Image: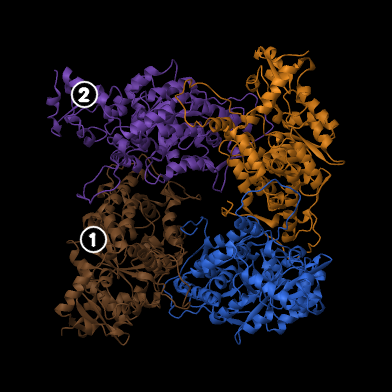
Chain colours: A purple, B brown, C blue, D orange
Amino acid sequence: MVLTLREVESHTSKDSCWVIIRNNVYDVTGFLSEHPGGAAIILKYAGKDATRAYEPIHASDALEKHLDASKHLGPLDASSASLLDHARSHRKQTKDEKRVELALKQRPPLGRMLSLDDIEAVALKVLSHKAMAYYSSASDDEQTHHGNIRGFTRFFFNPRVMREVRQTDASTRILGYRSSLPVFVSAAGLAKLGHPLGEVNITRGCAKGGIIQVLSSNASSSYSEIAEAAAPGQTLFFQLYKSADDSAAEKRVKEIEALGFKAIFLTVDAITGGKRERDVRGPWYLEALETGKETYHNDDDPLLEVSVDGTGGGLVSNDDQNMTWEKTIPWLRRVTKLPIVIKGIQCVDDAVLAAQAGVDAILISNHGGRQLDYSMPSIEVLYRLRRRHPEVFEKMEVYVDGGARRGTDVLKALCLGATSVGMGRPFLYAQTAYAEHGVAKAISILESEITKGMKFLGAASVKDLVPDMVERVDWQPVGPKL
Amino acid sequence: MVLTLREVESHTSKDSCWVIIRNNVYDVTGFLSEHPGGAAIILKYAGKDATRAYEPIHASDALEKHLDASKHLGPLDASSASLLDHARSHRKQTKDEKRVELALKQRPPLGRMLSLDDIEAVALKVLSHKAMAYYSSASDDEQTHHGNIRGFTRFFFNPRVMREVRQTDASTRILGYRSSLPVFVSAAGLAKLGHPLGEVNITRGCAKGGIIQVLSSNASSSYSEIAEAAAPGQTLFFQLYKSADDSAAEKRVKEIEALGFKAIFLTVDAITGGKRERDVRGPWYLEALETGKETYHNDDDPLLEVSVDGTGGGLVSNDDQNMTWEKTIPWLRRVTKLPIVIKGIQCVDDAVLAAQAGVDAILISNHGGRQLDYSMPSIEVLYRLRRRHPEVFEKMEVYVDGGARRGTDVLKALCLGATSVGMGRPFLYAQTAYAEHGVAKAISILESEITKGMKFLGAASVKDLVPDMVERVDWQPVGPKL
Amino acid sequence: MVLTLREVESHTSKDSCWVIIRNNVYDVTGFLSEHPGGAAIILKYAGKDATRAYEPIHASDALEKHLDASKHLGPLDASSASLLDHARSHRKQTKDEKRVELALKQRPPLGRMLSLDDIEAVALKVLSHKAMAYYSSASDDEQTHHGNIRGFTRFFFNPRVMREVRQTDASTRILGYRSSLPVFVSAAGLAKLGHPLGEVNITRGCAKGGIIQVLSSNASSSYSEIAEAAAPGQTLFFQLYKSADDSAAEKRVKEIEALGFKAIFLTVDAITGGKRERDVRGPWYLEALETGKETYHNDDDPLLEVSVDGTGGGLVSNDDQNMTWEKTIPWLRRVTKLPIVIKGIQCVDDAVLAAQAGVDAILISNHGGRQLDYSMPSIEVLYRLRRRHPEVFEKMEVYVDGGARRGTDVLKALCLGATSVGMGRPFLYAQTAYAEHGVAKAISILESEITKGMKFLGAASVKDLVPDMVERVDWQPVGPKL
Amino acid sequence: MVLTLREVESHTSKDSCWVIIRNNVYDVTGFLSEHPGGAAIILKYAGKDATRAYEPIHASDALEKHLDASKHLGPLDASSASLLDHARSHRKQTKDEKRVELALKQRPPLGRMLSLDDIEAVALKVLSHKAMAYYSSASDDEQTHHGNIRGFTRFFFNPRVMREVRQTDASTRILGYRSSLPVFVSAAGLAKLGHPLGEVNITRGCAKGGIIQVLSSNASSSYSEIAEAAAPGQTLFFQLYKSADDSAAEKRVKEIEALGFKAIFLTVDAITGGKRERDVRGPWYLEALETGKETYHNDDDPLLEVSVDGTGGGLVSNDDQNMTWEKTIPWLRRVTKLPIVIKGIQCVDDAVLAAQAGVDAILISNHGGRQLDYSMPSIEVLYRLRRRHPEVFEKMEVYVDGGARRGTDVLKALCLGATSVGMGRPFLYAQTAYAEHGVAKAISILESEITKGMKFLGAASVKDLVPDMVERVDWQPVGPKL
């Protein structure tokens, strides 16, 4: 069936809601209540072309996967399609788009990137405001986010000298899979907000750099695209938001197992959306930017509410809020033979429970400070776990993410017992700024920093990194970058 | 008796002092020494129209209540009244009034308020300078005020995962009365400085939000206005400044008991006025603003003194400075059957004494840092009480106010054993900025923050919030808002 | 003998150095090596009129006292005197003098001074640059000076409520002498740099305020002027820099004993000059200010040295650097029956030795941070003494100075065991800004702050101030004034 | 053989690389792989005049020493030489050179230098950007560099009074050699970057000031120049980067032994280059400065890499990364009878191992924060060593460098047990700003600060400086310079 723009334009209500994506028409009426991002955002495009809003945050197979074929109503007629094509291509650039276009032209050469912070600084310039707000924001007052980063600054080294370190090897094994560095890419969604190729950039960069990518459930590239983009033998892990519907969750697990992912990172710290205020404020900022108005008239309807969940808030709206150690781990063991990693452990007691539950590993993480503000910084949780329950490190692998930006940060975590350190935002920024080359560059920076650091610490291999080599200090570091 | 302006104008001394309020003439000669705010401020208006100065800081029934009917001398004659009406309505706006008028027009929509800090920022723009100085100031160097707020930033969470929290209930009972949240409005006076409806805005907002208001003795709305504004079944508590005159104090208690208030918060930390320098400086700032003069000529009379008590300093001038546990608690028990809460406990030892004295609850409070500077921040007192005398929490309810601005702040206090957390300034600011809608909005923000926080902490009800979930850290939080 | 200007002008060398002061000629050749401020500064005025440089830093009897009558060569002849008078009165004002003159006219009324900091802010505006640099500077990086002030901010109160404090009495006795407040004026020299009446302002202000002044050996008013300025019955103490020459020291003690001073504060922390860089830089700043030149030409004589002792550095150049407990205390006991106070105790062990040596009191002091930088802040020394040797407070009185600016600071020190708290700079600033009225005002501010604070703490008299009422905290206070 | 410019110009590849230095032609093809700074930097000048780049960072005997005589191909012909001379002398000054030239003219007189920080401030103005970046930079986020300096601010004094200190003697012996102060010049290379006379300035200044210089292996003056510049009897020590080639290392040791150096400081913390980002960025900054371009075009070759080793990074590229206590110390003992000092001890355990290995002394040092960032600040390592292993100080001498800038810093280290304190950057800055006079001035400032400090502490000789005189505090110092 071929449809005209005029036909589509009359379906703009909750009772009949059609949208156009890439010149095809979809009836999403029945899907409104299931949309992870909520109905309101879809209704904003009811009866209209939604392509520009849809593309950067959905995987290419999202429509096929989530909308029954019967709701794929058919293409627009040639004249309507031509009209929309013209509208899209002649759309006036927004001020924010112009700023980004210029910033992309003025990026410094990749060779001048000396640190992950350098890359982040470039990315923050070339990101759209919306993407910047989504990537960089954290919840409430962002104390845990900043606490993650500053947390590392309170650990200083006791370096050992006069050790044979000419041959230094920074490689390790994670759940049995080789990694060139004790570093992996932590799950972080919506990579296409930063670059059209999205998560594929990360996959390709990891192939070059020899480290493992944990793919987000909320990836904007489809899982199969990622599986296809992987190099032969490249290891991929998968981060799972468990649906409240066990069968839906099982289907997801089977799907990614079939695609060749090698482990499941079950996320337990994001059962509802974090309150990321900078993300919520993004559209208001853009409105003020485009209109030039910064003041308001009197509040006509003071009771009008807004959603405070921002770009990514709704992504977890169907998640299981009733997971338990007793119920959920055995269920997952039944569903898959893949190793199980619990992502989002935020205190010592839960690390102990995870070990008792027999999972293969935990990822100490507070979701980059994007969920509960004032959750203990990750490196502090690791430090407490090492002091109070060193035996846990014998029973399972322990990873940590949140705040690591330097080779020395990675080495601190390894000294405290971590097998590997995850990084999320740094790789989102790297692919934003320089696509796959940025990802490879970030890995190469870390490789140099980690190897130098090992030599300075007197460690020829990761096994030589021991707790005595780090010490938590009681002063507040201050310096040109802090 | 009808009086002329000319007749009034001759009564300008301590020996015969008349003032005009709403075109009625009052002989306040005998009242000068009893005025809580001191005689000087009245004498400034002796023989003149005092309406504008009087209204925003007095309850509507203040004249009836405090001045014998014989001193109500009668109305002005029509010509005098007309003259004053004209003068009031044609008075030239001050620069500060113009600024406020514009700021009110430019308030952002209520829907854009994401946090209590957002609301405070709006309120600080739309408040008159005098009101801003009175509301926001604290004593001396304001260390306790800022210490209250920063105190919360030193407590981080140990969140628990894998717990059933789909059904989360943040409601609680305070002295047996239901509250939708573990939050109440702490007593804070002179709400009309911020908005013409004053404390009534708070009463109405609390009705919508389902939380309890503690009315200040210094409310600018009359107690009966508040009682009338309350919704059916709405719970109100009363904050009492005990007069040094026991019979006057008893009369006040009987009055509010009759009006249906359900508990007495006896304030013990404000027996004399705090030294709030920004409040004292308010009039000088305004003088400089209006005249444009910022410099001075030589000091003609270097010994001329000024009162350092500011707008609210005199409000406690008749208060009982000789209260004791042995004398005052039994007296109050005799006078009323209402539950007794001691407001202004600032150290562990006094909390223990309060429990021994058998009061129903204490409110750990330092009056928002407005009395003794360097009084220990409230959350620190609570923390010490929990560690040194956990049994106190079994004997009576413990509340805390001072510095809480976020749902996470409330949750920290509850983990440490508090039944409920009071907030004063945030609700003054909320009614200032958006009247009753602002109050309801503040409650709704807290509801969202508290409920999200409980899910993240693994607490389905307030009973699940336990001391192990918080940890006092030794670093100084730093971030974009600090 | 009457001399001409021409005759004087030829005596400009170390071998024959004459100077003119108030139109009288003095031969100071023999005195060059004894001058506490060094020979260089005198030689700068050799053969010239030194009146302007001399007056603000010397007592009126300095010439009589230190220079043998035979060296008073006689007056200038009338023509020379008239020439000098004319030169002095027609001297072009410097930029710095013009700035001060204007600032004096623009001082705010005394009534607007709410705190000692307010008065300091006025003083810093009306001081000449030279005086400002001398008063405000401390040694090296000024860590101890700032540490003294910030030291108090780490002590918070545990205030007690429900105590009878209607009658509050802040008076105390110091070495048996009544003081209206537990505060005294610590010795601080060269008050005439700030105001022509110098230390006399302080004497008069103390008479009004009822507190005790400790007069500096380096007072710019003569000791007898101070004794004469004192009100009947007013108590004065004396601060002694002991000369290396015991007989000179004894003579000084006898002199002040005869003038009626009631105690000797023997200074032990200033046996050589502190390195006060801002003071040393003062003249260079003024040179740049007057000439408008801020850059330099190449260094002609790179080995040319400058004195780094500044305005006050040389004042201690003849002091005894070999004092000991065994030798010096018995000597002083022999010389005088006055109570002996050791000023400049900076650690616990020396406080214990002082008690063993049987002195009447100690003043814990680091000379306002003007001697050894990184000397432990005074309040920290007091705190350690109270914890490690509480018995010392039974054996002798303990005072503390350095950093106290608020009534709450005084109360903290008293809670920790101090009998009284000294303040130096605040009173120099007070007399600079408002002469004796400023001093009285400062005392009245402290009286109000201390009395309010006692009521809030639940202390009716200074005896009720106990160690449990203060607690050292582990956070770094931050606020609008810090 | 005389060569023409044209002949040289054709040797520009790895296979045949000629360069011109001071109008002589050298064949460095075979040396490319041995050049400590890497081949790339030489190839940049292949076939060209390298004089300007070569001179400031090479000792005058570098060519003779490192390049076989057969590779000294001969002088340029007169015409070529004249061409190059003309090019050099008519070369247009760069903006950076002009800035430096002006800054040199505007230096303040040496007499106005009151502290080492004053001298540093002058040096930072007169240094070329390249030299500034090399001298001042440290690795990564420079936390250890700033931590070294701030580390000292956490130690406060407990000064003792009433001690005989009229005669104060700050001299000491280091490895048996007299030093006028407990201070030495720590090894720091490339002094010619700051001043044409380079390390010779330091040698001469030390002769005047009576302290010992530790000459860097990377000195830009030749070792023999330094030996010749030394005054009769002046003590010089030598800092050794041990080559991986034992025989080359032995040759170096023999050479400096023959030149009269009195001790070997074997560096163990710099086995690979530190990551000094500001140093690496230097050339980019200069490029932007000269061209005025601050933006970039799209990244043509995103994979183009840059070296991150900066000016000095390559200097250690041939160093022994397999040194051990068991192997290296006995080897060095065999090779030389000179005292052996291990430079670069960064933790307590290695200090203990050094004592067990029987070395004569250790230098606690983290290379000025230029190697491993987050290495524990030097003074903190010394403090821990004193507390945990006081017996180590009996077995060998202990020195410390990194962060000391004041006499009080030196005294703190001595109280904690150090024999002497090294300073590197301060002396590089001193010779940069004022040549040998600056070095002598820095020593004289330290002499004054140390002597005053000893008097204030009650220490007549360095032996009187004991651990009880310092105390580590728990606050973060804040002041005008911090």
Name the residue carrying label 1: B201
Residue D438 at least partly seen: yes
Q: Is residue C124 above or below residue A129?
A: below
The image position of residue B24, as x and y in percent, is 19, 78
Disc 1 and disc 2 on one polypeptide chain? no
Quadrant, the N terminus of chain A: top left
Number of the label disc, if any, that sits on residue D359: none
Q: Amino acid at mark 1?
A: Asn
Q: Amino acid at mark 2?
A: Leu
The image position of residue A388, as x and y in percent, is 51, 43
- Residue farthest toward the right in the current orientation of the protein: D232
Q: Give the camera-side residue of D20 and C258.
A: D20
Label 2 crowd bin: few (<14), some (14–19), many (20+), radius 10 Å? some
Give the letter of the chain under mark 2: A
Name the residue carrying label 2: A84
Residue D418 at least partly seen: no
Quadrant of res B283: bottom left
Q: Give the camera-side residue of B243 and A324.
A: B243
Apparent side of residue B396 relative to residue D284 in the rendered image (left or right): left
Q: Secondary structure at mark 2?
A: helix
